[in-house]
Amino acid sequence: MDSKHMMVLALVFAMTTGCWDDLNLTSPEDEQSADVEKAKPRVAPDWSDADMQVWHFAKAKGIHGTDFMRRTVGQYELMCVRDLPEEIPPIHAGPPDSPELWVVRDGESLFTLDDAKMAPVLMTDQAQALAKIFAGELSWMGAVNIHGITQTQDDGVTTLSWIHDKQSYPPSRLSNWFKVVVTATQDGTKVHSERMKGYVRPE
């Protein structure tokens, strides 16, 4: 029996047994209209003019978030624009799927953490605070015991490096040491992370 005969028998059976309404016979057009109904309109937040510049900057890069977090590092403002989910899952479910973007404001200039303009930011006197932000981007659990910070600038290459403990998931809390090197050149800023097996923090 071919597929056409099978379909006819299924329809006859559905009509005679009253199961017609239970069949899922939606068309692609119906499914598309249902998706449109589910989608919520993107509403611009009511922020100051300066912060709205950050919002538009993030929106142009695909992040339509209305959750705004600000950190001041030396003369720079670092702002994280997040698009939070409607429901935050419990911590044991892992990190929520929250698209976000860090935006750096240096006077009138806005740029991201991977921009070449990060070079002078990496030389800030508040390197510890900057390292915490990068560590948070590398692991949703963040990092503890940030130490061994070095900053160098030579022949167009700017480097910020440190060592931190990206602890294992609770409840074990075992040490998990990493060395992180952030390098800025005229081509942009890149982050390299390397695990340090057997590392013991010096006293």
Image (tube, rainbow, N blue to C red):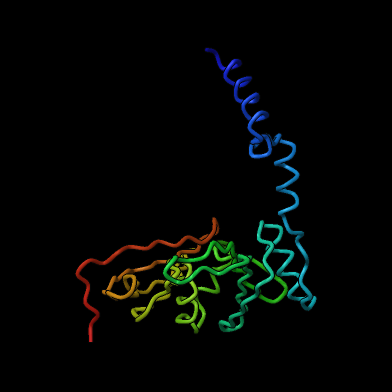
In percent of width and height, residue 97 lies at 54, 61
What residue appears at the point 35 percent right and 75 percent down from the top-left corner?
A: 164
Please name whichever residue, 29 or 62, is drawn nearer the observer in this view of the structure. Answer: 29
In percent of width and height, residue 71 lies at 58, 81
What residue appears at the point 74 percent right and 64 percent down from the top-left corner?
A: 56
Q: List the single residue furthest toward the top.
A: 1
What residue appears at the point 59 percent right and 68 percent down from the top-left corner?
A: 87
Instruction: Name the quadrant containing residue 135.
Output: bottom left
Q: Is residue 66 left or right of residue 203?
A: right
How many numbered discs, if any?
0
Q: Is residue 56 left or right of residue 203?
A: right
Which image quarter is the C terminus in?
A: bottom left
Instruction: Name the quadrant containing residue 139.
Output: bottom left
In percent of width and height, residue 165 lies at 33, 75
Instruction: Name the quadrant containing residue 22.
Output: top right
Considering only vertical position in the picture, is 59 above or below 22? below
Please name whichever residue, 184 or 147, is drawn nearer the observer in this view of the structure. Answer: 147
Q: Is residue 197 left or right of residue 82?
A: left
What residue appears at the point 52 percent right and 12 percent down from the top-left corner?
A: 1
Q: List the single residue furthest toward the left.
A: 198
Please name whichever residue, 48 or 76, is drawn nearer the observer in this view of the structure. Answer: 48
In percent of width and height, residue 4 lies at 61, 16
Please name whichever residue, 111 or 123, is drawn nearer the observer in this view of the structure. Answer: 111
